[in-house]
Amino acid sequence: MARSKALAKSIIALIVLVIIIAAALAGWYIWTQMQRPTEKIYIRFAGWSAGETEMKNYEKIISLFQEQHPDIIIKYEVITQMFHENILASYGAGVAPDVFYLDSSWAPIFIDKGAVLPISDYVDEEFINQFYSFLLEPFKGADGKIYGLPKDWSMLMLFYNKKLFQQAGLTRPPDTWDELVKYAEIITNKTGVPGLAIYLGGFNRYMPVALSNGAPKPWFDSPDDASWFDHPVVRETMEWYINLYLKGKIEREQKGLPPYVVAPSDVGAGWLGDAFGSQKVAMVISGNWMIPFLADQYPDFKFGEDWDIAPVPRGTKGRVTMAYTVALAINSKTENPEAAVEFVKFVVGKEGQKTLVVKMGHTLPSIKGLENDPDMWPQHRKSLSFLDEYTMVQIFLWGPKSGELESKISDIMAAAMRGEITIDEALESMKQVVQEMFQG
């Protein structure tokens, strides 16, 4: 009996000892795991920049993301020239970024090449349904999946210098395209400052002129679609647009007169925002992206006091503006899709857009409801009030190769604007570009 009790005590003692050792080992394992450095995930994020302001704003939103996700490090890269061409080329070299801007005009090419991840496979329907459907459309593949989420959007509008208008005796912004040219000439003659700045080329900037005068909506996906350039309204409005610079700059200078139309580089500016903010021109037609740049880089040039915005001028058949949207897309070959999705959701989601787009005044929000946020900048709010005046808002997309077409047609337009080729030669070259791009 005594031996049995002793044996039982020994067994209990052994069990207790095993438990103590097991607990010690478990504690040691947990402690060692806690001491090991956490492995960081690096995500390369590439975008272009509408100036230093956009870069600073993105650096802020990245900093906010990393505060909440300390294990994900975002490496921000800005590509200033031929953004989409460079991104596509980087796939061949195996060095494409994990997340990047994807313009609506280039989206079909990237989707067709299988270069981007179907993000609708990674986020739920409720998240996607927050966005305006017309902004999602360019990023939808033939399989119905969504391959990019719009980070914001902008529309074209007229920016005008109120003080230069006052000096020229003008009391309101121009209402028609012809009035735009007339005003530009008056301002230059009265003040010596060029009335209007435009880009050399810029097929998308010409589009409101064509559509507001009755040209059919363009869509290019076969050689036959080159006939769009034969339409009488297209030929007439293309001639009008090219002549803006030919007559407003080149012919004026040949006559010894100051130009009333210039390109930004003609006044020592890098882009339209810089030309307008430095008050070297009186008017430009640009998008919402210019607004935070002016506030940041030209704080003494006050909205409402010194400058204002107005709808894009109208044509004979109505008033048309362009809408631009850019998505954040994910490289289909990324090694860290979950981390990339987390970053995209943060930037384009409701809280991210409220910070970056609404509070920082970046552009217009792509999520429904944020347009009524009390923090919306008054300039952006005013631009939204113009929507009722437009008979059409044309999104920057005219076929599966819109981005390539835009680049090639704009180069031809620029050559004609500089007087290197005639307008007829330019139109024939544009037709050839479309035919060659889609043949066989």
Image: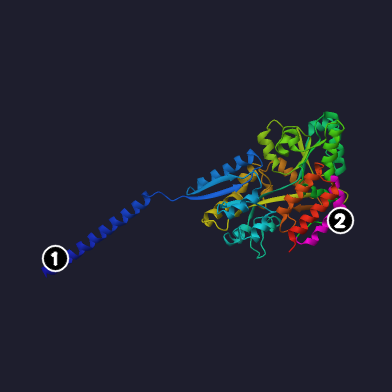
Residue 252: x %, y % from top left: 85, 34
Residue 59, by quadrant, is top right
Residue annotated with mark 2: 231
Residue range (magenta): 221-240
Residue 421: x %, y % from top left: 82, 45
Label located before the other in sequence (1 or 2): 1
Q: Residue at x 69, y 30 (%)?
A: 300
- Comparing 143 with 231, the one in front is 231
Q: Which amino acid does the dot numbered 2 rest on?
A: His
Task: Give neighbour class at mark 1: few <14, some 14-19, many 20+ (Cα, 10 Å).
Answer: few
Let me know if residue 170 appears in the view.
no
The N terminus - image quarter: bottom left
Q: Residue at x 84, y 33 (%)?
A: 253
**Dominant SS type (magenta):** helix
Q: Nearer the viewer, mark 1 or mark 2?
A: 2
Residue 38 falls inside the magenta stretch? no
Q: Which amino acid does the dot numbered 1 rest on?
A: Ala
Mark 2 element type: loop
The C terminus - image quarter: bottom right
